[in-house]
């Protein structure tokens, strides 16, 4: 996601771009943060940190009877410090109100990349999602009990 967001921002001629990503995906691509900092890419990175490989865990929970395998990361990364180590701004939020404040400030006031870390529960459903082997016709957009 991070590389694509950088490319999208460049294609949008430097207009502020927003990436919503998880800690697993971000961890696999975080070296691209150096590129975003080097070129002062106006990118807001909203990082949902659940400490697991969330998409795979969610599939295992919903479609494989909760048989979890190889999804717990077993690490505690301080993404605010990591962002700062790369030269970006980082902020951690702990409530929807704090997120709204941080996002508004990041979107309206920052010039380069900023990481907004949002700790969430490892079992929080992140929607929409596709089931394994599914197509766009199978897109899940709400929890089953909400249907």
Image (cartoon, rainbow, N blue to C red):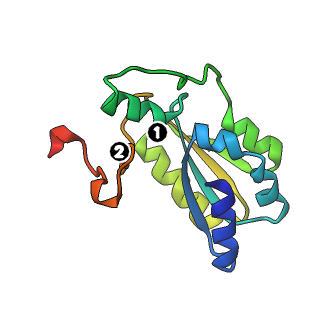
Which label sits on residue 131? 2
* Residue found at the far right of this picture: 38
Q: Nearer the viewer, residue 145 or 63?
A: 63
In the image, 96: left or right of 109? left
Q: Residue furthest front?
A: 133
Q: Earlier in the sequence, mark 1 or mark 2?
A: 1
Q: Residue at x 55, y 48 (%)?
A: 21
The percent position of residue 31, horizontal first and vertical second, equals 78, 47
**Which callout, 1 or 2, points to the residue nearer the camera?**
2
Asked if residue 42 is positioned above or below residue 146 in the image, the reply reads below
Quadrant into which the N terminus falls: bottom right
Could you tell me which residue is drawn at 70 percent across and 58 percent down?
113
Q: How busy is the neighbourhood of tag 1: few (under 14 within 10 Å), some, or many (20 plus)?
A: some
| Image position of 9 (left or right of 100) | right
Residue occupying image coordinates x 82% and y 41%:
85
Which corner quadrant of the image does residue 26 belong to?
top right
Mark 1 to mark 2 CA distance (whole Å): 10 Å
So how many labels did they put on this image? Answer: 2
The residue located at (42%, 46%) in the rendering is: 97
Give the residue at the far bottom of this rendering.
13
**The residue tagged with tag 1: helix, strand or loop?**
helix
Q: In the rendering, at what x and y percent does residue 51 appear?
A: 55, 28
Up/down of 9 relative to 133, above or below: below
Locate residue 124 relative to residue 120 in the image: left or right: left
Percent x, y of residue 36: 76, 59
Task: Count neighbours of disc 2 (C-alpha within 10 A) and say few if under 14, some if 14 to 19, many if 20 or more.
Answer: some
Q: On the image, numbered disc 1 is attached to which residue? A: 55
Q: Nearer the viewer, residue 62 or 83?
A: 62
């Amino acid at each position: 996601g991070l590389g694509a967001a950088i490319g999208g921002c460049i294609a949008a001629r430097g207009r502020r771009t927003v990436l919503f990503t998880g800690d697993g995906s971000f961890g696999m691509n975080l070296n691209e943060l150096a590129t975003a900092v080097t070129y002062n890419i106006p990118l807001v990175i909203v990082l949902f940190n659940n400490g697991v490989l969330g998409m795979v865990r969610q599939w295992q929970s919903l479609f494989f009877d909760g048989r979890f395998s190889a999804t717990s990361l077993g690490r505690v990364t301080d993404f605010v410090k990591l962002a700062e180590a790369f030269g970006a701004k980082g902020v951690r939020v702990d409530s929807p109100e704090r997120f709204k404040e941080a996002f508004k400030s990041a979107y309206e006031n920052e010039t380069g990349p900023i990481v907004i870390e949002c700790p969430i529960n490892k079992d929080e459903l992140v929607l929409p999602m596709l089931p394994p082997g599914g197509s766009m016709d199978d897109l899940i957009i709400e929890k089953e009990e909400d249907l």
